[in-house]
Image (cartoon, grey):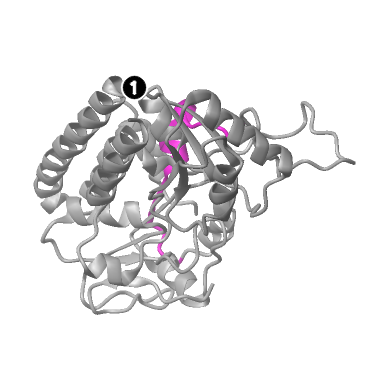
Amino acid sequence: MRRLMAALLILTALSGCQRPVTDGAPAASAPGDTRSDGKISVVCTIFPQYDWLRQIIGDNEIELTLLQDGRVDLHSYQPSVDDIIRISACDLFIYVGGESDMWVEGVLRQAANPGMLVINLLDVLGDAAKTETLVEGMEDDDDDDDDDHGDDHEAEYDEHVWLSLRNAAEFCSVIAGALSSIDTDSAAVYNGNLAAYTERLSALDAEYKAAADAAPVKTLLFGDRFPFRYLTDDYGLEYYAAFPGCSAETEASFQTIVFLAGKADELGLKAVMVTESADQSIARTVIDNTTGKNQRILALDSMQSVTPDSINGGVTYLSLMESNLSVLKDALN
């Protein structure tokens, strides 16, 4: 059962203006109303949660809403009035729980559904949650000359918890448990779908491990921010980057560029990495400052830019992680 029982205790209810993606025609009810269609309503904040839910729900009739649809990422999102109404009336709400989700606490205080269950992914991880770490050469956008960032400076959690297949399996277990407690008649369906999906997650995890173990290169270098710490830690990979994963910085200093270019030369790296939404200017500048100036730019997908069109086109959490594995193999060879 691992952390499931503890997580289910966390689940008990806490008594932007983009249009959310919703599966199921009926809109969320106004606070205090009862949905006449009788459907269970689930609201989640990011695409990975949304796709895990789709896999676990299967063909069951559940109203599923994704709030962040790729037009603004986790770090910039603020809920609209419609979003707040949907959350207030839902049966299950799932969010990441880091610094970017500080808005959630105020919204949950207004919840109209006293039986709502809530899943905070960072709480599910507990002690396994990682904090943002400044590695050598990385810009610190939290560095104020006049402030003392000593023992009183609170570490910020790395929010990109979904980029670990092992974390995903744990989250799916907790999600299936929550759905089963809400809809006991369908518990067997949810648990069966969970078992099948967990097998697929585990199989892909094994492919990642085999690729990392066999790779001649064990380091990734990002001319960008770095949201992939959970992934690299799973497979024993090292990394260098211009910024931490939650950084809002877009300009790298001369010292950072020179450091990253020197590391690319020192380690004989054939690629400089970026995230899927980067303009690649920092990566190109790093390459221009290497000796060979011949590294390729490769992009790993952090799943923060998944649009409704991509979802309708068949993109899934596993398909994106499979694509990332292909890129990773290229980068480490």
Q: Is residue 283 visible?
A: yes
**Residue at the right extreme, as displayed:** 146
Q: Residue at x 48, y 32 (%)?
A: 129
- Element on which disc 1 rests: loop
In-front residue for pair 16/181: 16
Tell me the quadrant of the picture where the N terminus can be found: top left
Q: Is residue 245 visible?
A: no
Mark 1 burial class by Cα count in 10 Å: few <14, some 14-19, many 20+? few
Q: Residue 326 appears at what percent x and percent y?
A: 26, 41
Q: Residue 193 appears at what percent x and percent y?
A: 12, 46
| Count of numbered labels shown in the rendering | 1
Residue 68, relative to residue 222: is it above or below? below
- The picture quadrant where one finds residue 64 is bottom left
Is residue 118 part of the magenta span, yes or no? yes
In-front residue for pair 199/233: 233
Stretch of the chain drawn in magenta: 112-133
Q: Residue 307 appears at what percent x and percent y?
A: 35, 67
Q: Residue at x 13, y 38 (%)?
A: 195
In-front residue for pair 226/121: 226
- The picture quadrant where one finds residue 213 is top left
Residue 273, relative to residue 4: is it above or below? below
Q: Residue 140 appears at what percent x and percent y?
A: 70, 40
In the image, what residue type sits under mark 1? Pro
Is residue 171 part of the magenta span, yes or no? no
Q: Is residue 142 left or right of residue 107?
A: right
Q: Is residue 194 left or right of residue 47?
A: left
Residue 3, relative to residue 82: is it above or below? above
Residue under numbered circle 1: 216
Tell me the quadrant of the picture where the C terminus can be found: top left
Q: Residue at x 38, y 41 (%)?
A: 163
